[in-house]
Amino acid sequence: MRSEDEMVAYALEAPTALLRYLPELLADLEELGSDAEAIAGAIDDLDPTISTTVVDLGCGKGAVAVEVAEKLNLKVCGIDLFEPFMESCKELAESRGGDVLGALDQTVSVIRQYVKTGGYIVISDGFIKDGGSSDFAGFEQYADHDTMIARLTACGDTLLHEIIEVDICDGNEGELITARAKAIATRRPEIAADVLNYAETQVAEYEYIEGNFVSAIWVLKRTQ
């Protein structure tokens, strides 16, 4: 079984040895791949009440959690295994007047089985576009649109809404990470190879996503 650090490193596509440098490497990326405004809009379309609680699993730096709390005035529980990101999440929440809950002792197992019947699950992910390939490290589990929808609803839940996201990447994420990596490599030559390789991998992933992947937000209703 993976250790906590190994799970975090796997999720962030980095060697475990680079975990301490990830806050700096990703310092310029607030949303880390998710469109906070679009997700908040999808939740708003569900007409939540003031008593609604939203759980943001894998909340990262808190962009989505804070956007939902701020714009919809809802209580949001943010859960992430990477403590530096939780600190960033709390700082962002405080700077924008929101409360964010979450701790390392909470786990990623709180998705469907902790959603009551009639509750909602909002997933920000995607699928392989027509003619695209899943032959890229970390994307092997992805498939075409129909297959991904079948997987999403395999437990009998209802797909209520789908938002196809356009231009999810701003186009300069790779440049920002590379600049940070070069600064770290200059300062810490003993890890230069690892940190520069990480940056190269991220640039390659952004290029792959642009040519092969479609980002989407899916809203599911638990029916049983």
Image: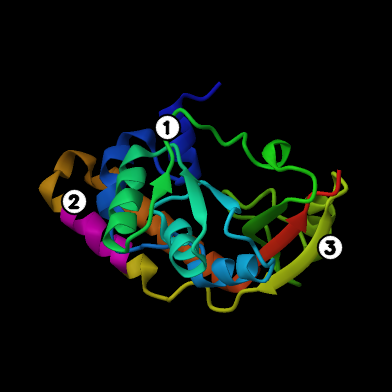
Write down the residue under mark 2: 184
Q: CA distance from mark 3 to mark 1?
A: 35 Å
Left or right of 190? Residue 63 is: right
In this rendering, the label closer to the viewer, 2 or 1: 1
| Residue furthest left in the image | 187
What secondary structure predominates along the stretch shown in magenta? helix
Under tag 3, what secondary structure?
Answer: helix
Write down the residue under mark 3: 146
Write down the residue under mark 1: 104
Q: Over which residues does the magenta segment extend?
A: 176-184
From this view, report whether residue 11 is shown above or below residue 3: below
Left or right of 18? Residue 81 is: right
Q: Earlier in the sequence, mark 3 or mark 1?
A: 1
Q: CA distance from mark 2 to mark 1?
A: 27 Å
Which scheme is used to colour this image of the protein? rainbow
> In the rendered structure, which amino acid carries the disc numbered 1?
Leu
